[in-house]
Amino acid sequence: MTFVRVFLGVAVALRFVATSAFDTPDVFPASTRAALAAKSGSLNPSQGYTTAGWSNRAATVLTPVHLDPNVYTGDRPFYWNRIDVGCRMTVIELPADDSTSGRPDLWVHSPVGLDGPMQQALNQLGNVKYVVSPNYEHLKFAAQWYQSFPQADMWGCPGLAQRMENIQWKGEIPDGFRPTAWKGGPGTQMEPDSGIWDTNIIQPLHIDIEKNPFTGKPFFNEVVYYHQPSKTLLCTDLFWNYPADVVPNSQYGADDTWELAPRVTGIPVGSRLWKFGMDQIYRPFFNNFMVTDQSQYRDVVNHILDVWDVETLIPAHGDILRGRTLIRQALREHFQLD
């Protein structure tokens, strides 16, 4: 067990501290909320997929987040030492012109546990073309997806193939990958025969600025992604947004009873304590002791904040954030820039 994990384990003996309250997010039209709810109704069973809980509050197999282009999430429990820390998968429908199967190709980020309803929903949407494991921790279900979708291209963060030799990986995001417009340049150019998706549409950014000070190796080794057509940022463990009892930023406006983002209730005690450990112990430890190059870290953060025009932030853990102002305020606080 690493020192970081020990730190997080200590957190279960500490009290829960609620999230900081951010300003109300930018309000989206009621017609958009209605369209997303209608899409959810056509995709999910009318009787509900499961009992609603804090890690799947809408009780859906997949939840629409953005339409035209289509982006969905799959929210599920995710256990660490018997603590449900929740996890969110993201599914992006790629442009139809890129498909060779006659059906939309799907790009899957940070896959969660796969079951019959999930497979049925995905088959309804299109063809699972890419399955992406974005860091060293979000790989628990990669083998399951590899076995269930043998035609899919498996992609991992740098170094993941060596860790998981039971999967035939299509490739890894190259170490130090930089997206389009990085410092005004073209970013990292992939070989034409690499088999990767169009990285101008879904742009990777390798967070190559962290090392565990006790092992000298990256701990998460995360790659974050920006989906340019929907202006959506995907993070796994670089940013998290574990909810409090009342969540002010999961809705499309002031109404917190919207069916696709209801209030969170019944958060287990262990999950609350996990949040305390992440917020109060891991985050300052990461910023102060794991970031090895503060200048490069600032470049990464500045690209996320200033170059990518993020309007939706989908974290693997916690609430989705919507609205440019809210997202930048949340990220600046999280990265301790203020």
Image (tube, grey):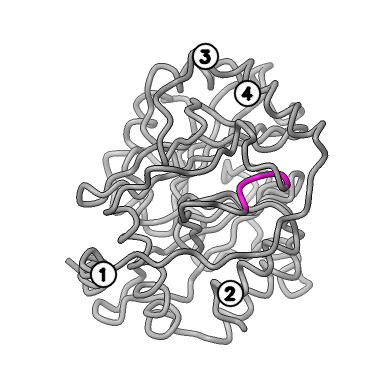
Which label belongs to residue 14?
A: 1
Tell me: 61 left or right of 86: right
Residue 333's disc is: 2
Q: Position of residue 114 (x, y in %)?
A: 38, 27
Mark identifier at residue 164: none
Asked where in the image residue 144 lies, by quadrant, the reply is top left
Residue at the disc numbered 3:
45
Circle 1 or circle 2, nearest the eye: 1
Relative to 144, say whether 17 is above or below.
below
Does residue 83 sit above or below 158 in this rendering? above
Above or below 117: residue 10: below
Total numbered labels placed on residues in the image: 4
Q: Quadrant of residue 53?
A: top left
Q: Closer to the N terminus: mark 1 or mark 2?
A: 1
Q: Amino acid at mark 2?
A: Glu
Where are the magenta residues, as a range?
249-253
Q: Residue at x 30, y 67 (%)?
A: 15
